Image (spheres, grey):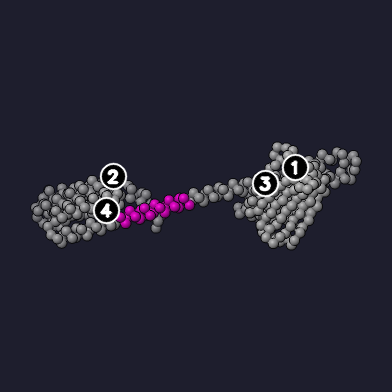
Amino acid sequence: MTAWRTVWQGRWARSPWWDVALAACVAVAQLWPLLSRDGPWHWWGYIVAAGSALPLVARRKAALPVLLVSHAFSASYDLVDVVAPQPLWYGPLIALYTVATRSGRWVRWGALAAVFSGGLLTVGSLDTAFRGVVVSVTAYALGRAAAGSRAYAAVLEERAARLERERILEAERAAERERARIARDMHDILAHAVSLMVVQAEAGPVVVRADPERAVATFDAIAGAGRDAMDQLRRILAVLREEQGSGAPKATVEDLPDLVRQAAGAGVEVGYEVAGEPRPLPPDLGAAVYRIVQEALTNVVKHAGASRADVRLSWQEQELAIEIRDNGRGTTAGLPPGGGNGLVGIRERAAAYGGTASAGPGPAGFTVRARLPL
């Protein structure tokens, strides 16, 4: 119903031909009593009847002048003694309806007063005057009701447009957050894998000469880090291809032992400790825990110059505490350009799930801590 009315208002109600057709119909209705009566033809009655209807062609552009002209012709109709006995009120009523729909308060009230005054000066009986007042008030009330309905429809349309704009903005913000999350994931995956591969590759020539068997293990670790990075990148790309975005598995807390073994393959001794009772985590939260530990270990391998690092997960009643501690330099002051991006990513991941993260010098090195609510 709403769609039909919108089409009607848009295509026909605003068309000038609609007013032309309306004026023609009103002219016929007002001329009909003259054409159907017996007696001689009186040209003045036809002019008055037509003059009361034809101004309706311009009723949208000049509502008040059209009303005054139409009402003047209609009022003069009663002064012609050769016409049918009933007054022709159709043109003035439609003009009054238009004024009530489109004009301001004072113009409306002034027009209504003018209609009443002119009617009282020309009618011949109280009964006719009463009928004129009733139909005029009815036309005015219908016009105000139409104006209110139109204003209400405009409010609803504006509200719907605003909600649609808000929906689009929210979708854009969600897409931006998702792009940022994917960028962090890819940064963490590549930074971790490439760091391990670079460290192991640099040590490879030395190990080959000193300990061939250990060199084989080193090269195996390089290949394993590359394969793991490729697997995780495939997971991300699979998520991007999924329409629902949830068809591919994500790294979780259960994958942390493998992550620790990879870091140990880069020449850093890594300890892994779990305190408390582990609990299942939502996939996104589990992936966030994994990425936080991954980025912290990547910084240990790349920047800390540490020989040992310890990863500790403490499962508490309402939160999960994560701590990664190393025995390296204990500061990030000497990091190369871009070296602090991972720590920013850790804070952003924790904040995204209502948690907190901090990083700074520890008792004998550098410590990264994060707390995530459960």
What residue lies at 9% left-to-right and 53% top-to-bottom? 81
Tell me which numbered mark, 2 or 4, is placed earlier along the sequence: 2
The answer to whether any part of residue 50 appears in the image is no
Image: 133 above or below 367? below
Residue 201 in the image, given as x and y percentages of width and height? 81, 40
Q: Taken as a whole, is the magenta stretch helix, strand or loop?
A: helix
Check disc 2 and report the residue beneath it: 61
Q: Which of the two residues, 18 or 335, is positioned nearer the viewer here? A: 335
Check disc 4 and report the residue beneath it: 97
Per the model, the C-alpha gap separating discs 3 and 4 is 66 Å
Per the model, the C-alpha gap separating discs 1 and 4 is 81 Å
The magenta segment: 143-163
Tell me which numbered mark, 1 or 4, is placed earlier along the sequence: 4
What residue lies at 25% left-to-right and 52% top-to-bottom? 109
> Label 3: how many residues lie within 10 Å, few (<14), some (14-19) or many (20+)?
many
> Which labelled disc corresponds to residue 345?
3
At mark 4, the secondary structure is helix
Q: Quadrant of the N terminus?
A: bottom left
Q: Are marks 1 and 4 in contact (CB under 8 Å)?
A: no
Q: Quadrant of the C terminus?
A: bottom right
> Label 4: how many residues lie within 10 Å, few (<14), some (14-19) or many (20+)?
many
Residue 207 in the image, given as x and y percentages of width and height? 87, 41
At mark 2, the secondary structure is loop
**Mark 2 residue type:** Lys
Q: Nearer the viewer, mark 1 or mark 4?
A: 1
> Label 1: how many residues lie within 10 Å, few (<14), some (14-19) or many (20+)?
some
Left or right: 121 with respect to 167?
A: left
Tell me which numbered mark, 3 or 1, is placed earlier along the sequence: 1
Tell me which numbered mark, 3 or 2, is placed earlier along the sequence: 2
